[in-house]
Amino acid sequence: MHKRAFLQSSAAAIASSILSRMLPAQTQAAPRTNWAGNLTYSAPNLFEPRSVEEVQTAVRDHPHLRALGSRHSFNAIADSPENQISLHALNAIDLDPAAKTVTVGAGVRYGDLAPVIDARGFALHNLASLPHISVAGAIATATHGSGLHNGNLATAVSALEFVNTRGDLVRLSRSGDPEKFQGAAVHLGALGILTRTTLDVQPTYQVAQTVYLDLPMAALEHHLEEIFAAGYSVSLFTDWQNGRITQVWIKRRTDHADVPTTLGPDFFGARPATEKMHPILGHPAEACTEQLGVPGPWYERLPHFKMNFTPSSGQELQTEYFVPFEHGYQAIRAVETLRDQITPHLFITELRTIAADDLWMSMAYRRRSLAIHFTWKPEWPQVRAILPQIEARLAPFSARPHWGKLFTLPPTQLQALYPRLADFKSLAATYDPEAKFRNPFLAVNLYTA
Ligand SMILES: Cc1cc2nc3c(=O)[nH]c(=O)nc-3n(C[C@H](O)[C@H](O)[C@H](O)COP(=O)(O)OP(=O)(O)OC[C@H]3O[C@@H](n4cnc5c(N)ncnc54)[C@H](O)[C@@H]3O)c2cc1C
């Protein structure tokens, strides 16, 4: 073949192969839903690029685009009326032992990452309750675990790489761009399409998990701090009935020499569980991480559920509100007044703590926080009716709702909870002046007055 014709036909072949991947990979006949199944995405098109260059092409070629992570958000934050883009194929994991960082592709989930870095002697500072969530999607909404001294998962981010509205690759780092970085780490998907994230790691560690039963809620009045300080990560579960915390899950690091791994028979009035528990009383516990004080790797204890247990679908709804820790007890009691409306529609409530941070759109921005979480039965009409009542009870504590969960707070009230919102919008305008990445969720919640 003539050289020029060959080049033209090769270029055409390459272009067509790129195009075939960049054309809507699925114009779904069957509706595409989030993990919980409570939301059917309205985006007709889903792009699944195989490289950063293909991400750039997709961004350049489309006026509206929204990244989709592992679909664990309960609201429409990841939806788009036109195009979604999933980076699940970008799954590289590059550990830098000397720098104590790991850089992950935007498709990497915590469950993929944890065993890889653990095998090389490293760990993350914390994990969410479920390991199946993508790093890019988790940090977008300030996803968190528990621990008085543990920031949310976005606080471990030291650098970000994303494709901006023009299709250019932008890199921001904590050390190089400290101001912008505080705005960009909890990104809400508003700045661009994340391609890589760098996270701090630390030497690997072991955790022992102990569960206590039936903690009197009254014990929280004077011992909230001590109770949450009993472990590296502590979660309290309640159904709001009978003035009790049904379970206390205490996760202790075995390398913290000042903290004994064994706990006594009486924990502020609660008694130790003698068998493995599920957070919801009566549910089978085999999917839960090991308990009864048996030490194990950090990533097999910090989440409540095992890595290799992949729940197929949720059949649940979630809501969560963050209040300043110092008002935690009053906030818990304020919600408790609604117990008889809440409990019939509730699987379980979880109470966790998050260290204060400086990330503009974080629910824990400049506030050490107590998070009051609700795992609801899939009964949206009833839950929808209760949420405004909970929000009203928590309004005196300036409660911030979780960005990835269900809430009904009016946009003006929501916006008032974020003192750096105007700066965040300016940052978004820098990278996305065309509002290419702004979807209806952001338009309503951040941009309507
Ligand atoms: C069973 C379950 C347990 C959970 N446990 C916890 C918990 O313990 N703690 C907690 O805080 N939350 C928890 N969540 C909520 C969850 O962590 C958040 O909703 C999180 O944002 C979901 O991440 P995802 O990867 O599924 O992203 P998605 O839900 O798909 O998207 C979330 C956001 O990330 C953006 N995004 C995703 N990828 C990219 C990218 N490459 N570039 C730009 N933006 C991107 C999306 O546009 C969207 O704005 C839980 C959810 C479920 C279903």
Image (cartoon, rainbow, N blue to C red):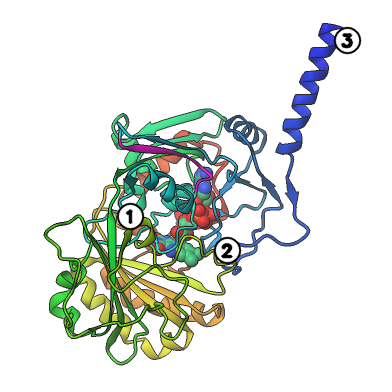
Name the residue carrying label 2: 35
- Please state, as top left, top right, bottom left or bottom right, where the N terminus lies in the image: top right
Mark 3 element type: loop
Q: Earlier in the sequence, mark 2 or mark 3?
A: 3
Q: Quadrant of residue 398?
A: bottom left
Is ligand 1 less than 8 Å from the beta carbon at label 2? yes
Q: Nearer the viewer, residue 282 or 208?
A: 208
Residue corresponding to mark 1: 126
Which residue is depicted at the point 50% across and 29% down? 169
Classify 396 as above or below 15: below
N-terminal label among 3 and 1: 3
Is residue 9 rendered magenta in the image? no
| Quadrant location of the C terminus in the rendered image | bottom left
Q: Amino acid at mark 1?
A: Asn
Q: Which three-letter amino acid code belongs to the residue tagged 3?
A: Met
Of the two numbered discs 2 and 1 on the same chain, state the one appearing first in sequence.
2
Measured from the top left, where is residue 233 in percent x and y?
27, 63
Alpha carbon of mark 2 to alpha carbon of mark 3: how far? 51 Å
Residue 404 seen in this snapshot = no
Residue 272 drawn at (x, y percent) = 25, 81
**Residue 1 numbered mark, or none:** 3
**Element class at badge 1:** loop
Q: Quadrant of residue 312?
A: bottom right
Instruction: Report, in whole angstroms, how far the alpha carbon at label 3 lies from the one at label 1.
Output: 58 Å
Tell me what residue is drawn at x 60 percent, y 42 percent: 89
Residue shown at 50%/46% (left/top)? 108
Is label 2 or label 3 in front? 3
Q: Is residue 24 above or below residue 243?
A: above
